[in-house]
Amino acid sequence: MTIESKPMIHEKFLAVLATAAFVLCTSPALAHPGGHDHDEPHHPQASRTWTLATEGAHLHGAFVAAKDGKVQIRRDDGALATLAMDRLVPSDQKWITERLEEIKRLNTQQGSQLVAQKQPHPPAGKGTTKEQPAPMMLKYFKPFEKTLQLRWDEKYFYVGSNGLPAHPMMVGIRSWQQQVPIPQKYFGDNAWRIPLHPTPAREPMSAKNNFLRGAIALAVNGVPIFNPLNNRGDDAYLFGELDQYGGHCGRADDYHYHLAPVHLEKTTGKDQPIAYALDGYPIFGYQDEQAPDFAPLDWLNGHKDKAGNYHYHATKTYPYLNGGFYGEVTERDGQVDPQPRAEPLRPDLPPLRDAKIIRFEQTEPSSYRLTYEVRGKAGTVSYTLAADGTARFVFVDPSGKTVNETYSPRQPGPGKDDRPRPGDRPERRPPPRREPAAQSPRGAAANRESDLPRLPVTSASVTPQGRLSIDCTCDGAGQSPAIAWKDAPAGTKSFAVSIWHTAPDQEKSYWVVVNIPADVSQLVQNSKGVGQIGLNDKRRAEYDPMCSKGPGVKIYHVTVFALSAEPKLAAGKATRAQLLEAIQDITLAAGTLDFQYERK
């Protein structure tokens, strides 16, 4: 239908009309696990990450409409969520207000017509209108277009990719966490997006202490590039974590680079961009100091050319590529936001000491084998990926022991239940489905307390309002919180404690304490000498105080386990993942206390 806009239309009615038109003109995101069928055309509107201010939880989905103080969001699982706007953080509320003002402005122009109909999807690799010609950026990705899905709109260039390069992977890695390359589904609403018109930031941000999670750039072959510093802040290259091309796999078996992919110049040509930072500025290869246009690089590893265009360069020493962002980006939870999400097929494993990867090969279509050595003896990881997403693994360790495992795609959800379930093997099976974060900050974990007897958990370091004492955060003294529990079942021989938090793409561990004696029912604030301290996510045997860099209130959890025996764990070296595996058959009861923290 066509509706003529008239100057005398009542302002309130027009605002409602504009919202209704926006709903009709927008194709809601109906994202399934892993995105859409790759043969379908996609609308360029991407899913956003929304933050609930009061819960500290995240919701992924596309904006649909806003009216009477409420907003509708089409979640990535296809469901329509309606919530009060004031539950969102101020930045999200501002985004909604600006979107409605833009719609109103377009629809109140004199003599204009508002056409309320569903717009056709642009085909992959094409602009949305004749007024949007192919951007210059397209030519640099085209050499790899057989494995990419390329499209654009007036603001962004979108790159759909499975995240895997054509070159060999993993060979040469000396510090290996037992990951292997598995194709990812960076397609549709989960595609990479690069600003077509980058804007210099008022205060450029360094990657030295920021953006330690997620990607900071995208190579022109569709492979993401992460911060050269890993999530512990160590130089991944110097630590021996990277292969001969500067890449490795993350916890989700997602392959990515940590160095500038200068090898791509063999395909793109010399003096052409090999990647784009997520702020929209290109990344070139190494500088030629003899070139007539040579100019020193700034602290971000970039400079302007003679035409005044800014770009970054690769270097052979840190920061190796863009050392931060010259352009505007949004940082949330330690990473550039928004960006695609990897989908782990299996839980991450601990590092395999003294292992070095010597070979990675494709043995058959969709079948692969990784070979590693430990002190001169070889082991292999072989796996086959089925059309339904199932993966069948065969692990042969250096002693010759063989283990067969099968993993199935997990259901959509932000994370996993912290408590082990009797009969399950948490490190070899995907976690259970959780309810959407907007409904329950702890998801299904809060709804499955009946799986095990409940252990009441309290804390004198948490206020009646549920806020963690500042003394237990990086804003204060950084002391471990007080934790108390009661009603341990008969037969309890020891206790274990885990403090954890569900981030958008992973679960983080802040404190692990094992082998707490059975006659102990509390840990005082800044506890010392009780139980054995395990490793946090920074690989340190200590409490890691909350130090959130993202906006809004975050929800954290402390779980106490009553155990029928002391778990068999190396003293001072137990990670949270190792703890969960070790106690799967000896857990008698468990209890979780949620608390909140907001960085000031």
Image (cartoon, helix red, strand yellow):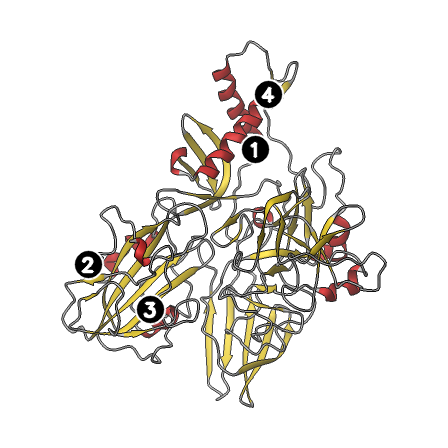
Kind of residue at disc 2: Pro
* Among numbered discs 4 and 2, the one appearing first in the sequence: 4
Q: Position of residue 507 (x, y in %)?
A: 41, 60
Q: Which mark is residue 107?
A: 4
Question: Which numbered disc covers residue 512?
Answer: 3
According to the image, label 2 marks what residue? 456
Task: Tell me whether circle 1 and circle 4 mark residues in contact (CB < 8 Å).
Answer: no
Q: Relative to residue 309, is residue 386 drawn left or right?
A: left
Task: Say which amino acid is labelled 4.
Answer: Asn
Q: Secondary structure at mark 1?
A: loop
Q: Quadrant of residue 51?
A: top left
Q: Is residue 23 visible?
A: no
Q: In the rendered structure, which disc, 2 or 1, sits on the residue that comes first in sequence? A: 1
Distance, label 2 to label 3, CA atoms, is 19 Å
The amino acid pointed to by label 1 is Thr
From the top left corner, tell me how far across and down residue 162 is, in percent. Answer: 62, 58
- Amino acid on which disc 3 is placed: Val
Badge 4 marks a residue whose secondary structure is helix
Q: Residue at x 68, y 45 (%)?
A: 151
Position of residue 500 relative to residue 572, above or below, is: above
Residue in front for this viewpoint, 210 or 496: 210
